[in-house]
Image (cartoon, grey):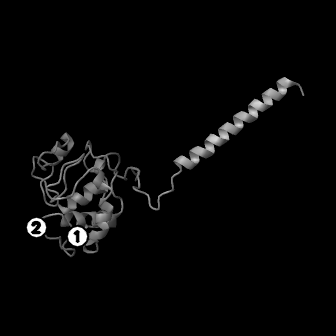
Amino acid sequence: MNSYVNTAVGALLGTVFVLMSVSIASEGIFHSEAPEKEGFTIVAEEAPAAGGEGAPAAVAVPIAKLLASADAKAGETIFKKCQSCHDGTKGGPNKVGPNLYGVVDRPIASHEGFAYSSAMKDFSKGGSEHWTFENLNKFLTAPKKDVPGTAMGFAGLPKDQDRANVILYLHTLADSPVALPDPNAPAATQ
């Protein structure tokens, strides 16, 4: 072989050696273990219901029956998804969304110091609508379908039991929680 070929092959092998060394060193420096449990599960928005685009999602099981078997502890765990945008402590701050302490039976779009979207203000009907168990259940199923134009970017909680658990947990976040609905009462029509 001539000296030019030897120089080219040496340069190529030297480059490969440097790149491999840098790769191995950076893997050792910047290596991170996979987490045991994912931080948040991203729920993609589901296809529109049979009612068509923009129609609120139908709630099949009455919330009163779901609340009878709900678990506030499980709801607290699910609520951790909400804590990036909402605070649930008494006197806590508003974040991207309003503070949710005392939200059950509070007038919609009424938390002091929070700038609600015009869609949410319209949905509140001037403060005459309240966050009843039924309203929370319907809203948390698919917020953007229930209140088109809301600034809330959360896709919703499609599982009935997850919604019931969160609503029961929200129910506990109050000085004097309102009474739970009777699971044997006839379902309210809306």
Quadrant of image for the N terminus: top right
Label 1 environment density (alpha carbons within 10 Å; few <14, some 14–19, many ≥20): many
Label 2 environment density (alpha carbons within 10 Å; few <14, some 14–19, many ≥20): few
For residue 129, the mark is none
Q: Can residue 115 be seen at all in this image of the molecule?
A: yes
27 vs 131, nearest the viewer: 27
12 vs 120, nearest the viewer: 12
User: Going by the image, does 176 lie left or right of 10?
Assistant: left
Between the C-alphas of marks 2 and 1, the distance is: 19 Å
Q: Nearer the viewer, mark 2 or mark 1?
A: 2
Q: Secondary structure at mark 2?
A: loop
User: Going by the image, does 34 lie left or right of 186?
Assistant: right
Identity, as a three-letter code, of the amino acid under mark 1: Ala
The earlier-in-sequence mark between 2 and 1 is: 1
Q: Position of residue 182 (x, y in %)?
A: 18, 73
Q: Which residue is outermost to the right?
A: 1
Do residues under tags 2 and 1 come within 8 Å of each other at their CB atoms? no
Q: Can residue 60 be seen at all in this image of the molecule?
A: no
Q: Position of residue 36 (x, y in %)?
A: 47, 62
Quarter of the view holding residue 102 = bottom left
Quarter of the view holding residue 14 = top right
Q: Secondary structure at mark 1?
A: helix
- Where is mark 1, residue-wise? 64
Q: Is residue 102 above or below residue 65?
A: above
- The residue shown at (21%, 42%) is 119
Identity, as a three-letter code, of the amino acid under mark 2: Ser
Q: Position of residue 41 (x, y in %)?
A: 41, 55
- Where is mark 2, residue-wise? 176
Quadrant of image for the C terminus: bottom left
